[in-house]
Image (spheres, rainbow, N blue to C red):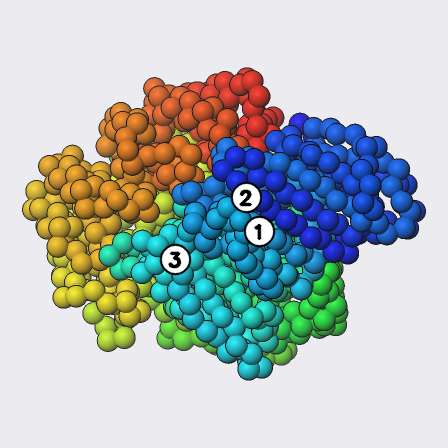
Amino acid sequence: PKEIFLRDYKPPSHSFAKVELAFDLREQGTTVRSIISAVPASGSTGELFLHGDESVKLDGVTVNGSAHERYERGSKGLTLKDLPNEPFELSITTTIEPQENTALEGLYKSSGNFCTQCEAEGFRRITFYQDRPDCMSTFTTRIEADKAKYPVLLSNGNLIDSGELEGGRHFTVWEDPWVKPCYLFALVAGNLGMIEDKFKTMSGKDVTLRIFTEKHNIDKCAHAMTSLIKSMKWDEETFGLEYDLDLFNIVAVDDFNMGAMENKSLNIFNSRLVLATPQSATDADYAAIEGVVAHEYFHNYTGNRVTCRDWFQLSLKEGLTVYRDQEFSADMNSRGVKRIGDVSRLRTAQFAQDAGPMAHPIRPESYIKMDNFYTVTVYEKGAEVVRMYETLLGKDGFRKGMDLYFQRHDGQAVTTEDFFAAMSDANGADLSTFKPWYSQAGTPRVTANGSYDADAKTFTLSLTQVVPKTPGQDTKIPVMCPVAVGLVGPDGKDMELTLDGKSVGTTTVLRFDKAEATYTFTGVEAKPVPSILRNFSAPVRLTTNLTQDDLVFLMANDSDAFNRWEAGQTLLRTLLLDLIKGDGQYKMDAAITTAMRAIIAGAKEPNADKAFIARAMMVPSAGELSDMLDEGTVDPAKIHEARTFVMKTLATELRADLEATMKANSAEKYSNEPADRAARSLKNTCIGYLSYLDDAAIAAMTYERFASADNMTDKIAALNSLSDKECDERIKAFAEFYEEWNKDPLVMNKWLGLQAMSNLPNNIANVKALMEGPAFDIKNPNKVYSLIGGFCASSVNFHAADGSGYEFLADVVIKLDDLNGQVASRMVSAFTRWKKYEPSRSSAMRAQLERIRAKKGLSENVFEIVSKSLE
Ligand code: B3K
Ligand code: ZN
């Protein structure tokens, strides 16, 4: 396999002024004809390389209407030779077999319907083309198919023609007036139902909005439609960005590698991110749908109107669009709770990636398979980098930068440097020390030590930073970290801050861009407790000299919701890490029990933020704890034991409080108002705690709640609370759930996932049986993510000491690799951090990686992850 490097970037040899595609869709042998208006760049050598997958059959090439035989076909594509030196018309005809496409890239079939997924490099599975994002063109697409089987025929842009054909066939023609790279091309042909709505844009244009699904799911699209309308309005109000066509389509399909895809005016979604009713989807599903519908819609500007020059720039569109969807969701819901959720995810998944063999900068230097770089680093850390511009420049400054970015680059394929320049130039700001965020991998480690001088009435904060080594990057330089700081006085109120003789309000953003720096606040009348890195203002690992008393104080008083939560998490993390590293004699810290009691008691206050309280009650996850332990030491069984001890002790000591809070927050009837959702999450968090008690009454109560739940959130919460318990109620609940829901594949994914994640001893046998059962299908990515991905999340069974869990995963990866390299490489990623584990587990994982590497014909996707992990 060949590695591709950013430093080798060269502009395309030809530009494509116009592309006309014609698809003749058949049950076997679909033909694709393209007519391209090609324009040689100056200095053209008369050669043009077109990407094309080995699965594509080439039927013919013509240049200006005459057959062109001078070409070479290689494993990656076609080199056309002796081409004219002036603009010419290139026509290519290919035959493909979408019905056999299990990679779900290019044109494929899902539930009998045709659909496409072209990002990153799927268009080359359809036809020969310059499959690179800097080749932008306007597309016209003609689709022809059997009318009875495929009454709906969709592509990008506006419908300009349609009609009947002989033999029960029909056609449509679509024209997209906006230039785009081929990764944004889409086509759908199927027997689909549709809901329709309208949106009036800020300049008064009417846009028709449609959501297509299989007909039996048509009553599950309302939430996605509402989310779309909210997104369109938000983007106008927040960034002045107005939709630019008369039609916007969303299509939901069951077989989809990722979450969704932002194809111009024809978004294609994994059905799990569209379909929802209160009975079939949880509150978390509702939130995910709202966020992803927004994300794909926002790409219309950040990604489509302005796209990436090359795939190394992926964070240009993804980091920015994630930032935008996070802000949208924060505005629609509770801002503090949203931030806490986003940071938890970043810390658990991205910090771990950045500390392992797959560590890469948000703008990677090289890749073998681009699909492997749709990562939490490019997306989530990329979003943090965008957020830091906002923190440094302020909301208005950030908006100015965005305006300049669109003004300069609309219709272009650009780089992260261009975004940086727009932000700097629009604000006249020198951000040069910010740049290493794009080129350096690794999470900076920041320490903050505060000290108060009562005589001088000063508070001094000393900061240090180190960016750790990562593979291929041994030396690093300091990078600008915006550190938002407040000082909380003894009365619990924020102090007015004075820094360098200037009054700077109650929260100030320190521009910390050296290895060490000291900041002295003056006129500090009493000893404060510093609140550092408010709202998690930079994606760093922070260590402070705050005491346990300081943290308890911040938990109760900090005006910053994130740091209120973080103070409690720091207490819990410290306790858990001590227990894990200790001698096995577990002892609870009474101060933590008291603090937790106070948190729960907060739920009784009028106007309590119950969603926040539920988050604050959560104990750091096994993944987060594992990330904080040293290489070569992680024993998942110990982490599980220590966590279980803490949960069980808290549940025992706070039982009365938990039961009372659970009852007080149990609703008579489901409602989807924010306050009801918040109460639901608090109640279900209480049930989760209580499930740690060995008490038959709790199992009976949980089953009772399961059976009588009138919504999926409560049903799943109860089922989850039973899933680690060896009891009849668990068996009954899972069986009844199956009876009720086995016709709904999305709900079955939840059923598979919960069972797979169970920490009951020897649950691997159950997982293997589920794999053979009717609810599973290895060709469907969602099912693989639920069952196999779920299993990898079980501390006990995936990490079983005898290595059986690892062997099982390797077996699955080897099988999956032949069907779908992208999904296989996601699954194999559970092995990448093998060096983190204690010797017996790490050598068992390593052995499985080697076994996978030895497989003949391994996909490039899996090869890249496995070989980098073993380096
Ligand atoms: N842009 C798509 C990702 C497609 C990835 C293909 N391997 C989804 C998104 O980020 O919106
Ligand atoms: Zn995206």
Q: Which residue is mark 3?
A: 193
- Disc 3 to disc 1: CB gap under 8 Å: no
Beta carbon of the mark 2 residue lies under 8 A of ligand 1? no
Please tell me in which quadrant of the rendered image residue 575 appears: top left
Identify the residue at image location x=43%, y=47%. 149
On the picture, is 745 further left or further right than 532? left
Residue 345: x percent and y percent?
A: 44, 50
- Above or below residue 797? Residue 435 is below
Instruction: Tell me which label, 3 or 2, sits earlier in the chain.
Output: 2
On the picture, is 77 further left or further right than 349? right
Residue type for callout 1: Ile
Identify the residue at image location x=28%, y=46%. 744
Q: Residue placed farthest to the bottom in the image?
A: 204
Instruction: Tell me which label, 3 or 1, sits earlier in the chain.
Output: 1
Residue type for callout 2: Leu
Instruction: Tell me which label, 2 or 1, sits earlier in the chain.
Output: 2
Q: Which residue is mark 1?
A: 143
